[in-house]
Every structure is written in structure tokens, then in C-alpha cells.
Image: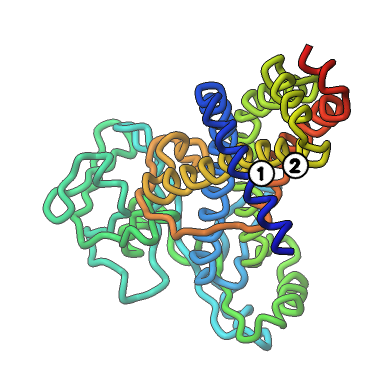
Amino acid sequence: MTGWLRRQRALADYTLAALARRRVKNAGLLLIYALVVFIVASATLFSSAIRKEAEIVLAEAPELIIQDLVMGRHAMISGELVEELVGIRGVSGVKGRLWGYFYDRVNGANYTLMVPLDETLVPARGEAIFGEALPRTRGLNWDKAPLFLSRFPGDLFRLNPAGRLESDSALVSADLILIGEEDFRSFFELPEGVYTDIAVSIRNSREIGTIVEKAGRLLPHARLITRDEISRTYQKLFSWREGIMVVLAGACVLAFAVFAAEKASGLSAEETREIGILKAIGWDTGDVIAMKLWEGGLISIGAFLLGTVLAYLHVFAFDAALFASVLKGWSVIYPDFALTPMIDGLQLSALFFLTVLPYTAATIVPIWRAATADPDQVMR
């Protein structure tokens, strides 16, 4: 075993020296290779981290949301249904929710106005709690400047700042405006006794399916949405956005595939001559193949590590500045929040096998042909 290790160390030392002799060519190959890994790894790491953020945020969401449907479209739901739902066994709480969207013609952004379910967060009349991105995009002072919203020409609805939402919830609250119920109904001209939807809290998560079935019989025309369904929707959304970046990286991957195919078609004259000299001085076929596998492995693994580390820094140190807008998906208001480092081992393993193994394997056939030929013929 010790002799085998010494042999591999000697092969690795010779391979490093051989790589240094062709440093310009190998450096260019390393950078192109690392670029391919960087693009795909950045999309993978960002998507994994933002999916994890969504899971953390949705952990506090209601177990069940009930919406009324009219002609297949979401409609306001009667508050009278709250009392009926409270009577279902296993339900710990039922509250009507008020939320809606508003298009701001000033900057082309869409805001979400909402009455918080937590009564401690409900601001006073004429006041609002703003999400992280809203004052930033409007150029407002957090503590002093009021926000004016215009619903139609000649109208101004004033909201004085009562606080701001923390940036750690910016994934879902960047465009959020929390206001009181009176202001909400006045702003949207909404009558009393109706809500946007109903939030249902359930004591035992194992009973969600049973309660959904009972609520469905009670409200046959309503749409029932569980927290797990919302979570799966977010996962699919971010996976789809990740796929966009992977497709955009397809050109780089294709170029790399062409290069790998060219590598498999044969060695350069210089490399062939080097193998012939090594055979002439006593190297056997196994040593030559092992040396070239060391060369391919060092380049591919080095490129993988370099691309992955740069992707990690790009996503978690620089907030994925190159393509965050594509993966976040906001058209005007972009949330400003720090991602918690999240590494998906399965995805990185798949990336490793898709990039490292093909290049390393592409070197075997031409090396075997050159290593098994007569040294004098190879050098000629």
C-alpha cells in the first residue's frame, strides 16, 4: 500500500510539472471550465437558498386558507362563514383576512395592502407599517415622510409611517403595507362583513386532511388551500426560475461539450510525443494512463472547486448580483435581504458528476491509443 501511494505521489508531481509547462493553455481551459461550473452552481445555490427562505416564512402561515369563488374567480367571502367554520372539531381559530393589491402609477410597482391578523401590529387610523423596499423605491424617509397613494386622478390617500417591517422577512414583505381595517375598507371602498379570504388554524397537523374534507362539504363552492400546497407552489416557482438560468447556461455547457468531444478525438502532437518519450524511457502503459488521468482529474476538480467557491461568494456574499432579478422575479420592487447559506449536497453532487467525470473520461481513449502504440512510431 505504501509503495502504491508513493507511486501515485510521483505521478501527481510529474503531472503538476507537465501542467506548468503548458500553463497558458491549461489556465485558459481552467477558466472556461470554471465559468461553466460557476453559472450552473450559482443558479443552484441561489435557488436552494431562496426555497429554504420560503419554507421558513411559510412556517408561520395559516394551515388552511378558504377563498370564495364566483364564476371560477376569487371573490370576497362573507364573514358569516367564520362562525360556521369555528364549529368544526379540530379547528383552533378562524379569522377573516383583508388584503389586496394596488398599482402605483408613480413608479409602476404593485403594492400589497393588508390588515395584520396580529392585533399588536395593527397601526392607528391614518398610519401604516411599510415593507423594506417601499420607501426605498419612493425615496421616502422611514420615520417622517408620509406616503400618498392615488387611486384615481385628483385623489390622494395619505398614510403616515408607523414603523417598518424587518428585512429578514423581505422575501414576502418587501412590497407590503400594513394598515388598519377602517383604512383598508375606506381605501378599497369595501363594505362591512366581507373579507378577502378566511384563515383557519388547526391544532393537529395530522387532521388537516379531515378538516379540509369537512370544510369542503360545508362550503362546496369555495377554494381550500393548505399551507403545504402553497409551499409546493413556491418550490415549483423557484425551480422554474432556476431552470431559466440553467437554460441560459446551455450555450456554455454546449461549448464545453464540443471541447470535451474534441479532447476525446485525439491528443496534440506535443502530448503524443511526450507519451512516446515516456514509453521509451521505461514507463509502462498503466503509468501513462494514470498520469493523464491525474492531469484530467486535477484540471476538472480544480475547475469545479474554483467555480463552486466563486458561486458561493457570488450568491451569499454579493447577493447573486449578476442575475438576482431573474431568480427573484419582482418586476419593480426587489426585496433586500441576506440569504442564509444553504447548500444542496445532492444538486452539487449531480453537478460534479456532470462536469468532472465527462472531461476525465474523455481523456481515456486517446491516451490508451497513444500509450499502447510503439514508442518509436509515436515519436515520429
The kind of residue tagged 2 is Ala
The front one of 346 and 23 is 23
Asked whether the residues under the numbered discs 2 and 1 touch, taking CB atoms below 8 Å apart as contact, a structural biologist would say yes
Q: Earlier in the sequence, mark 2 or mark 1?
A: 1
Q: Is 190 on the left-hand or right-hand side of 182?
A: right
Q: Quadrant of the C terminus?
A: top right
On the image, numbered disc 1 is attached to which residue? Answer: 11
- The residue furthest top is 380
Is the image coloured rainbow, by chain, by secondary structure, or in one colour?
rainbow
Left or right of residue 296: residue 106: left
The residue that appears at 39% across and 60% down in the rendered structure is 169
* Camera-nearest residue between 128 and 23: 23
Amino acid on which disc 1 is placed: Leu
Say whether residue 269 is visible: yes
Under tag 1, what secondary structure? helix
Q: CA distance from mark 2 to mark 1?
A: 7 Å
Q: Residue at x 62, y 44 (%)?
A: 12
Residue behind mark 2: 290
Query: Regarding mark 2 in the picture, which secondary structure is present there?
Result: helix
Kindly tell me whether residue 196 is visible in this rendering.
no
Locate residue 91, reporting x and y percent: 62, 84
The quarter of the displayed image where residue 298 is located: top right
